Image: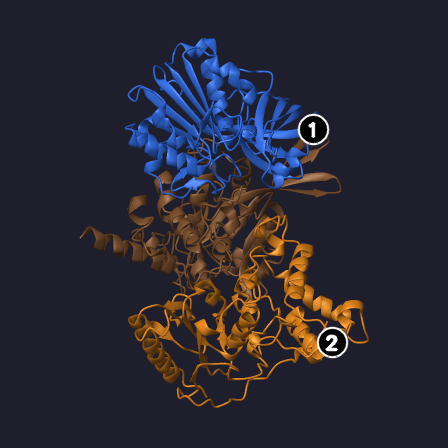
Amino acid sequence: MSMNNPYIPSRATIMQVIQETVSDTQDVKTYKLKLDEPFDYRPGQFVEFSIAGIGECTFGFASSPLIKDYLELTVKRTGYVTENIHMLSEGSTVWIRGPFGNTFPLEKLEGNDLFYVAGGLGLAPLRPMIDYIFDPMYRGKYGKINMLMAARTPGDFIFAYDFDKWAAMPDTTFYQTIDNPMEGWDKLVGFPHTLIDQIPFDMEKTVAVLCGPPVMIKALSNAFVQLGMSPERIYTTLEMRMTCGVGKCGKCNIGHKYVCIDGPVFSMAELGNMPNEY
Amino acid sequence: MSAYKLDIARVKAALEKLMEKYTVIAPVMNGDRLDYAEVTEVNDVILDNQLPYKSPKEMVFPRVEKVMRFLEGKVEEAQDIKPVLLVGAKPCDVAAMRIFDDIFTGDKGKFQDPFYLNRRNSLTIIGLGCTDYKNGCFCNIRGTDLSFAPDCDGFLNMVGDSFIYQPLTDKGKDIFTGEETEPVKRADKHEEELVLNAKESEVFTTMPWEAYAEGCIGCGTCTYLCPTCHCFNLRDAEDKGVVTRTRVWDSCMYPKFTLHAGGHNPRTKKSERFRQRVLHKYLYIPENYDHTACTGCGRCIRACPGGLNIMNTVTDIKKRLEEAKK
Amino acid sequence: MIDYEKQSLKLIETAEKLLSDNTVDVVLGVKDNPEVGWPTPYFARKPEDAKKLVWTEDCHVNLANYLTEVKGKKAAIAAKACDVRSIINLIAENQLSRGDITIIGMECAGKMQNEKLASACDACPASVPNLYDIAIAADGSETYKNLEMPNSSENVTEWAIHTTVEERLDRFMKEIDKCILCFACRQACQGCYCVTCFIDRKATPWEQVDADTATKMAFHLTRAMHLAGRCTDCGACEKVCPSGVNLKYLFKGLSEFVEETYDFKAGMDPEATPVLDRYSSDDKQVAFLGGDSIVGI
């Protein structure tokens, strides 16, 4: 992004394309990008990613901000721009502007236990935070960590290659669940909101960080609140159709809050005060 | 600064000279209606009580703004702008500039908009007072004066057959001169009566939005003509191998405005879209920038084929809020 | 010629009755709108709402389109002859069900817009609708007077025959030059009910990079082709246009061509199969491969 013009992107080159989902749809890929003008970012922020002549799309960062050589974006094939992104291969030129938006309140969360719940592609925007906190430099500042990863089928998990590494981290409990029972699956089965009461965690000390489809977020946060968690301690990150990323274009507002500058990270307490229009 | 008295011949003579230095924009006839447009013949300029059909927002926020071009793996940014002189902007249209200034140059989003700033800095605005209200005008209850607007570089008022020019800034100092005179006595400042002092939760679901919006056909003409509507989209187009990215107007009255690629749409109904338009002007922008984003020009009311009326809607919401408090 | 006061009173009385005995859930009409200067659409849902309804020489709005929004409900509609043609077309194309609709046929001698006769009303074929349930005649009675219709200015058909291709193109370009691509014409058109319009497939309305002539031509010509044999000549497109684009020159010729070639006129018979839905081996091929004469195009 040009220093004085937030609309001008800078160039990036695709270093590697990683096929994430191995289910029938195979509709999620991760793109490892090398930037001409690298920038710093924080977990929770997002970028505007574009192909010249096709258009722009909004994606959350999917790799740890501690990695300085490259960044990763995880893209599900779902619309016009993402279809075109999925046709790109290594060496292609793409354009990036950012970083935009607020961040997960990492400093504020220090000293707390964490409970990550991610559904499907919802894991992508949480991964920068997960990797950041697992870094030996920061791990000591946080308590026990619970991770519940959900997907439709075993083939729909993204970043599955990271799971063993995460599960082996100190003081961390790692769970996986799929929607329906399947032969050969010996882990959890069912939607995350039906499972959290079976997972032991310290209600007073834990902060929940959720991301997934809107229905999952709504059901999950209700389930946490019913178990006695305060809405201030539940965080999620929203997605909205966006154009500018800088609070001008008027697309992503929920009431007077703009998801691009006031979000995308909101606590459930904040969302409770906003109109239900997302 | 003192004011000057001059007749229309002198105004036009001055404009003739100014056309050498500036691109002069003023109300001129475009077919059978009055529009703010570039002046090519000074006698075409019409300075009277009529309100031009479209707002002058295109001077600072054009319908299509070139953002950049992709050239051989590099980007080429947009170029400089020739100075523009906008003469005859009505008080409601001048007031709208303040709202644009807030949104595009304010610190709320911490990002300044370079395209807007570029055009705004090269623009000199000379306001023109109205002598009377037109059908559909409601600037009186929106706190806009008939005979004065502060956010411009100079102001013309019609007094009998002649004009009184009041320069307001350095940019406006030498635009018109004439025989020195007293500035026009301003009419009493109107109160901003039509404002919503409410929380989002008090109006979002409780008001009869479906009834307010039932005539809407979703054409978006209201947002096209509105002097404060500023939503946009970025769009790429390829011509002979060169990709140009442009910023184009968009409208919250279109269903695709908020449609996610995945198919989810937070605003599927026309009542929800109309609610967004009304509350964005009367609740969301005031919350973020401290004043209402409607100047009472009445263009949306006059042009709406479905007869939607933002003034009646807000008045009705106010009435319902007061009743609820009792 | 027309007693609008008596028509209004009769309309209010009728609407009140239909709403109070629950014959219908909603009456579509127009109400006074002083800020706009002409009456605008109004949905009366309770008997006491009925008194807001008016009928004047300015009520040029075609309300047929709003019927699709109250689909499934019992609805009455105050409709002029042109509006009724639109309703018939929507019934013929299975967008509305005749049983749900009560047509209050308002006798009309042409409507005014901006203090002139609306362009679409010039050379209107009839003052009386060809399908109705309740009649409100020019004098407020139930017996139609079959008024003579205004037929003043240029005859578009004659004009089309006696002009060259260049002149017609010139006229068309002049008209669409005014277009701002807001698509109000499409939104107001009874025939434009596609869930996703061809022009919205990729870009939303104003995204067309410049409102350039090519885009305008593409839009207006494609839309015209989609409305061949379906346009009911109601003029709603012209009446809602914020820029005053006169589309009559495009559509009138098209309708006349279809009528002459395939003997079909949209909006005449709710039972008729729409012309684009039927095929016969002896259909004239002029429109397809070019024939001797193509009238009005």
Colour pattern of the rendering: by chain
Amino acid type at mark 2: Val
Sort mark 1 into few (<14), some (14-19) or many (20+) by Cα contacts within 10 Å: some
Report the residue that reaches farthest toward the front.
A183
A150 lies above or below C208? above
Chain colored blue: A
Residue A36 shown left or right of residue B231 in the figure: right
Find numbered disc 2 in the image and state the secondary structure of the residue it sits on. loop
Amino acid type at mark 1: Ser
Q: Quadrant of residue A145?
A: top left
B198 lies above or below B128? above
Res. A89 mark: 1
Discs 1/2, front: 1
Residue C277 % position (x, y) = 65, 69
Chain colored orange: C
Asked if residue C82 shows in the view, the reply is: yes
Q: Total label count?
A: 2
C37 lies above or below A192? below
Residue B153 % position (x, y) = 46, 45
Residue A129 % position (x, y) = 46, 21
Find numbered disc 1 in the image and state the secondary structure of the residue it sits on. loop
Label 2 sits on residue: C295
Nearer to me, B33 or B89: B33
Asked if residue B187 shows in the view, the reply is: no
Nearer to me, C185 or A148: A148
Q: Quadrant of residue A6?
A: top right
Chain colored brown: B
